[in-house]
Structure formats: C-alpha cells, structure tokens
Image (tube, rainbow, N blue to C red):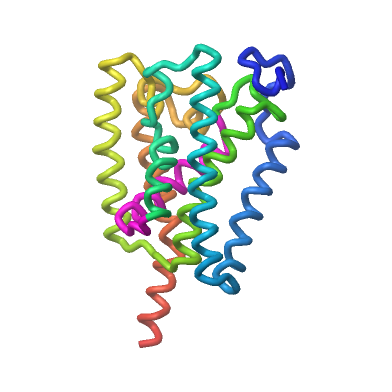
C-alpha cells in the first residue's frame, strides 16, 4: 500500500503506449461502447442509476486525488486549482449529469471529449506508472469525462449543432485568456499555455512557445470538426431524403 500511494514512487515509470497503457485505453473504449446497450435495453431507473453512479465516481476520484496531494504536502494553488480543461470538466460533467443541462453538454461534447481524449492518449504521469494510485486516478478522471458526454449523446439523445461548435470555440478562447491571466498572477501553468508539460504530449510536435498555442488551437478546431462530422452527415442525409 505504501508504494501504491508513495509520492516518490520507485516502481516502473509511466511509458507511453506500454502494455498497461494500451490495456487501460481498451477498457475505456469498451466502457463507452457498452453505453450503446444501455440506450437499447435500460429502464429509466437504470439510466438514472448510471448517471448518478458516474457522478459519484467523478466526485470520489477527484476528492481522493486532492486528498492524496494534500497529505503528501504538495497541494498548491499553482498546480491544483481545477483550471485545466479536464479538471474543469470533472465538475461541469457532474452538474450536466445531475441537471441534464444542454448548455454544459455543448461544451462537454467538444471540449470535454477533445481535451480528455488527448489526456488519455498522452497523460501527464511522469514517474507514476501502473499500478500507482496516480495512474488509476488519471485514467478514471479523464475516461469519466469522455463517458459523461458520450452518455448524454447516446442514451439521452442530445446532439450538438454548428452553433454549439462555434460557442465551444469562442468559449475556449475566452477561458484561455482568463487562465492566462491567472497564470501571470500566481506563476502557474494551467492549460500549459505558459510552457509545455514536462512529459511527452501532442504539444511537443506543435512548435516552440508561443506558437504551439496557435497550433494547438488549429488542432482543437480540427478535432471539433471531426467530432461534429457524424451529425453533419446525419443532417446531410436527412436533407437528401427530403
């Protein structure tokens, strides 16, 4: 148990696309594919239980993460405020699942799925490989953010529109400006806009600072368009039939 929670972990560090990473990604994919059966077969009570179960998982996982950081003496406002997109969407996703807010859904679909998927593929884990607590906490957190938005899409039958994508793009840029101000005031690096993360990530191939921020915006827009593609095709088919 000591090594499982150790701050100075001496086990195997995280390795990108290692066997443990690939297995964990596969589990996330399978969980989200299973949501299709929930739409087809589940009662209203079962759907409600799934939503509130996911809420509990998000809250408990995030609470455990903060408690671990606090008890190891490493909690600071420079690193632990929920200002990274994925940290923000842990809380927004819980509200969305409880209230079924379509306004939050519009942002969760594009920014939650887009940001959390990138974090699942290139997590900022450093020395914390399998089976450390931080390894599990990271994948549960980001996987649950993705699952929350997919659940609302597949089971509750919410869908985004072109205006949703526009709001997500504008909202993300306004939020980035706010976070940039916070970074300047307290010396933090939320959203990795002050500098790149220390561990390998997509940002490594997007150029030096500050140009990688503009490149990341272009990638984000491309991801948003890709996420909207199924609905664009659905609308095109419907218009063709008419």
Please say if 37 is above or below 202: below
| Residue at the (42%, 23%) spot, across then down | 80
Q: Which of 11 and 48 is in front in this view?
A: 48
Question: Residue 90 appears at what percent x and percent y?
Answer: 44, 41
Range covered by the magenta-colored residues: 99-123
Would residue 102 be counted in the magenta stretch? yes
| Residue at the (36%, 26%) spot, across then down | 193
| Residue at the (36%, 56%) spot, across then down | 99
Please say if 187 is above or below 208: above
Left or right position of 114 against 38: left
Question: Residue 50 appears at what percent x and percent y?
Answer: 54, 58
Magenta part mainly helix, strand or loop?
helix
Please say if 15 is above or below 11: below
Question: Residue 231 appears at what percent x and percent y?
Answer: 42, 67
Would residue 114 be counted in the magenta stretch? yes
Left or right position of 213 against 135: left
- Residue lying farthest to the bottom in this orientation: 242
Question: Residue 17 appears at what percent x and percent y?
Answer: 68, 36
Q: In which quarter of the image is residue 173?
A: top left
Please say if 84 is above or below 108: above
| Residue at the (35%, 81%) spot, across then down | 239
Q: Nearer the viewer, residue 39 or 70?
A: 70
Task: Name the quadrant of the C terminus.
Answer: bottom left
* Image label count: 0
């Amino acid at each position: 148990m000591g090594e499982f929670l150790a701050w100075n972990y001496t086990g195997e560090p995280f390795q990108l696309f290692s066997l443990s990473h690939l297995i964990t990604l596969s589990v996330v994919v399978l969980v989200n594919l299973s949501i299709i059966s929930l739409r087809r077969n589940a009662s209203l009570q079962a759907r409600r239980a799934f939503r509130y179960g996911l809420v509990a998982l998000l809250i408990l996982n995030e609470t455990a993460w903060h408690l671990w950081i606090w008890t190891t003496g490493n909690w600071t406002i420079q690193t632990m405020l929920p200002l990274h997109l994925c940290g923000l969407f842990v809380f927004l996703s819980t509200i969305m699942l409880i209230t079924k807010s379509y306004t939050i859904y519009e942002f969760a679909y594009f920014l939650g799925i887009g940001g959390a998927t990138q974090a699942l593929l290139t997590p900022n884990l450093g020395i914390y490989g399998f089976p450390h607590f931080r390894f599990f906490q990271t994948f549960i957190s980001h996987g649950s953010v993705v699952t929350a938005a997919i659940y609302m899409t597949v089971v509750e039958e919410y869908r985004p529109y072109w205006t949703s994508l526009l709001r997500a793009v504008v909202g993300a840029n306004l939020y980035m400006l706010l976070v940039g101000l916070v970074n300047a005031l307290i010396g933090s690096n939320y959203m990795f806009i002050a500098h790149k993360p220390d561990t390998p990530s997509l940002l490594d191939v997007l150029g030096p600072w500050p140009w990688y921020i503009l490149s990341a915006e272009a990638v984000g827009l491309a991801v948003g368009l890709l996420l909207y593609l199924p609905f664009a095709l659905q609308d095109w088919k419907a218009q063709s039939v008419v």
